[in-house]
Every structure is written in structure tokens, then in C-alpha cells.
């Protein structure tokens, strides 16, 4: 449905997208996972046709985006920054967006009703948007992006500034639309969101996409299959120091995390802990997360 080929975008001397290629099939829930400044919004704005790439090609259903205004009609964008008229009420906002898409009369009225209902905003439809919480504004922005029934929805960090209740409502709504056939591209710097929502994930950092695949495929990129956690205290500090030569040891809040290097035998780990007199109950091993994949591929964490 959507293909990017070697796309480059510069802002002056800064290269925001540095040769990005990816393909997204109809019906996918595709995640773009990367920290702030990685290039997620830039990619979304190029796909939405708001900016043009400096090099490379973007095609929607094999048609170049630049030559086909109809291709853009198949897209809906939920921008990172809320784009609503604050003094107007929810209804008036949706009416304006709907009319921009060429919708009129009963079709527009029905779609507004359906959207407000789906995002649980019906009883607030006559309230000025400036009185809405961040989560409600975001939900309204999503309704606005869907009025013209796009086939592909671009959601650029749609949970920024959103309360947990609205976040869940947004997740469930997007999941339902995706089950009904909507293709979604969802950018986030939260690995939990990418893990929960996305059937495939592209890791993005410094304008490049170094890896892309299902969660399982991405986890296979790691040289280790599990990581071991243990409490951080005086008794375990010597162990952490000894493990530094056998893999990566990171300090978290109140715990250490050990990721063995390739070929390291866990039996050696348990021999070491025993020799230091540390009981087995201190250690939990767990399947690594996307965060570990990100660190492995980019050398930094998602929060950096
Ligand atoms: P993300 O959405 O992942 O946070 P962005 O696409 O917003 O990343 O930004 C990528 C890089 O491009 C960052 O270094 C950012 O500062 C820069 N950038 C984004 N928009 C502009 C702009 N309009 N002018 C100049 N630099 C920009």
C-alpha cells in the first residue's frame, strides 16, 4: 500500500531522514519506534504530503504521492500537535474538517455523530474545545482525521499528554478500526505501545531505520535470549562488577540488569553467584524487550 524508497529529507544542514526505505502492506498496524528527534514526524509529514522529500520516492498503491492528489485523499493524519480551533466546540470543529474533505449534509452529520460516539465525546459536543482535557482533544483530533474514511491513518505520537483512560480508549478504537481493515502507521517512543499495538515495527534513529519486523523478528536480532535481573545493593555490587566482562550490566531503579554476551553459559552465571554466596531467589530471568533491541542496534536508549 505504501512504499518509501531511499527517502532523504534535510532541514538546512541537518539530515532528518537519511535514506529510509520501507514497505507497508494494506491492513498492517505498523509502528515507528524511536526517541525524540529520530525523524518520526518528518516521515509522517512526507507521507501525508505536507512536505516533499529531497531525494527518493514515496508511492501509495504504486502511484507517486506527488502526482496524485487522490492518493492523499486516502490518507488521514493525526498530527503530533493538536490541530483544532480552541474557541469552537467539538461539532463545529468536525464540521470544518469534514467540509475541507468535501463532505456535506447528512453524510457529514452521520460521520460526525458516529465519530463522537466512538470516541465517547457525544455529551461534550457543544463544549468549546479549549475546555477539553488533553486526552479529549486528542480523541477529537482522531475523529477529525477519520471523517473522510481514509484507507491509511497516520498517527504521530497520539498519546502525548493523554491521560491513561483516554489512552486506552484510543488504543481500543485504533485496534477496532485496524481489525475492520484500516492500515495504521503509528509513531511512538514508548516500547510498550509498539509492543501492544503493532504487527510490525520499524526502529528509527537519527533518520535511519536500522531494523524492521515483527516483535519476534526484532528480538532475534539480539545476541542473547534472556536477561537477568537482580536487586541493586551492597551484596550484589561485586557480582555486577564481575559480570561486566561477560556482557552488558545496566543499573535500573533498584536493580541490575545483565545481558550476557553471545556464547556465555548461564551455568557460569550460577556458579559465580554461588561462589559469592548469593541465593538463587535474587535472580529473575526474563525475555528481553524492544528496549534491549533498540539499545543493541543504536547504542542508546529510547529515552535519550
Ligand atoms: P521525531 O518526530 O522523531 O521527534 P522529527 O522528525 O520531529 O523527529 O525531527 C527530526 C530532526 O529534524 C530533529 O533533529 C529535529 O530537531 C529536526 N527538525 C524537525 N523539524 C524541523 C524543522 N521544521 N526545521 C529544522 N529542523 C527540524
Image (spheres, grey):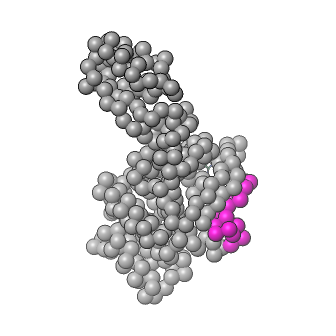
* Residue ranking furthest to the bottom: 106
Residue 104 appears in view = yes
Q: Which of 207 and 108 is in front in this view?
A: 207
From the viewer's perspective, is residue 54 above or below residue 127?
Answer: above
The stretch in magenta equals 49-68
Quarter of the image where one finds residue 64: bottom right
Q: Nearer the viewer, residue 74 or 109?
A: 74
Quarter of the image where one finds residue 124: bottom left
Give the number of marks.
0
Q: Residue at x 45, y 85 (%)?
A: 107
From the viewer's perspective, is residue 219 above or below residue 162?
Answer: above
Question: Residue 175, percent across and down?
Answer: 40, 63
Question: Residue 80, percent across and down?
Answer: 49, 56
- In the figure, is residue 177 to the left or right of 121? right
Taking the magenta stretch, the answer to whether it contains residue 243 is no
Q: Which residue is drawn at 62% across and 54% down?
A: 22
Question: Residue 109, percent across and down?
Answer: 41, 83
Taking the magenta stretch, the answer to whether it contains residue 60 is yes
Question: Residue 17, percent across and down?
Answer: 65, 48
Quarter of the image where one finds residue 252: top left
Which quadrant of the rendered structure holds the N terminus? bottom right
- In the figure, is residue 171 to the left or right of 1? left
Q: Nearer the viewer, residue 250 or 108?
A: 250
Q: Which residue is drawn at 51% across and 57% down?
A: 30
Residue 303 appears in view = no
Q: Which residue is drawn at 54% across and 39% down?
A: 221
Amino acid at each position: 500500500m505504501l512504499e518509501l524508497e531511499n527517502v532523504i529529507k534535510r532541514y538546512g544542514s541537518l539530515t532528518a531522514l537519511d535514506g529510509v526505505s520501507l514497505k507497508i502492506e494494506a491492513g498492517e498496524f505498523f509502528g515507528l519506534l524511536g526517541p525524540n528527534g529520530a525523524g518520526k514526524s518528518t516521515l509522517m509529514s512526507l507521507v501525508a504530503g505536507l512536505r516533499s522529500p529531497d531525494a527518493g520516492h514515496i508511492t501509495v498503491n504504486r502511484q507517486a504521492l506527488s502526482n496524485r492528489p487522490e492518493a492523499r485523499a486516502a490518507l488521514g493524519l493525526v498530527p503530533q500537535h493538536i490541530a483544532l480551533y480552541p474557541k469552537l466546540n467539538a461539532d463545529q470543529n468536525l464540521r470544518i474538517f469534514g467540509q475541507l474533505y468535501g463532505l456535506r449534509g447528512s453524510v457529514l452529520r452521520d460521520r460526525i455523530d458516529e465519530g463522537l460516539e466512538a470516541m465517547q465525546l457525544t455529551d461534550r459536543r457543544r463544549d468549546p474545545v479549549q475546555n477539553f482535557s488533553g486526552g479529549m482533544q486528542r480523541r477529537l483530533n482522531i475523529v477529525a482525521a477519520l471523517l473522510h474514511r481514509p484507507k491509511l491513518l497516520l498517527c504521530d505520537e497520539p498519546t502525548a499528554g493523554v491521560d491513561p483512560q483516554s489512552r486506552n480508549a484510543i488504543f481500543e478504537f485504533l485496534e477496532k478500526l485496524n481489525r475492520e481493515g484500516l492500515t495504521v502507521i503509528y509513531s511512538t517512543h514508548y516500547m510498550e505501545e509498539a509492543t501492544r499495538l503493532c504487527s510490525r515495527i520499524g526502529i528509527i534513529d537519527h533518520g535511519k531505520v536500522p531494523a524492521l519486523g515483527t516483535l519476534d523478528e526484532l528480538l532475534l536480532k539480539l545476541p542473547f535470549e534472556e536477561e537477568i535481573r537482580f536487586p541493586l545493593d551492597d551484596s550484589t555490587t561485586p557480582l555486577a562488577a564481575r559480570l561486566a566482562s561477560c556482557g552488558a550490566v545496566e543499573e535500573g531503579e533498584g536493580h541490575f540488569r545483565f545481558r550476557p554476551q553471545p556464547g556465555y553459559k548461564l551455568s557460569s552465571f550460577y556458579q559465580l553467584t554461588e561462589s559469592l554466596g548469593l541465593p538463587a531467589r535474587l535472580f529473575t530471568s526474563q525475555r528481553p524487550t524492544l528496549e534491549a533491541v533498540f539499545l543493541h542496534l543504536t547504542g542508546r536508549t529510547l529515552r535519550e
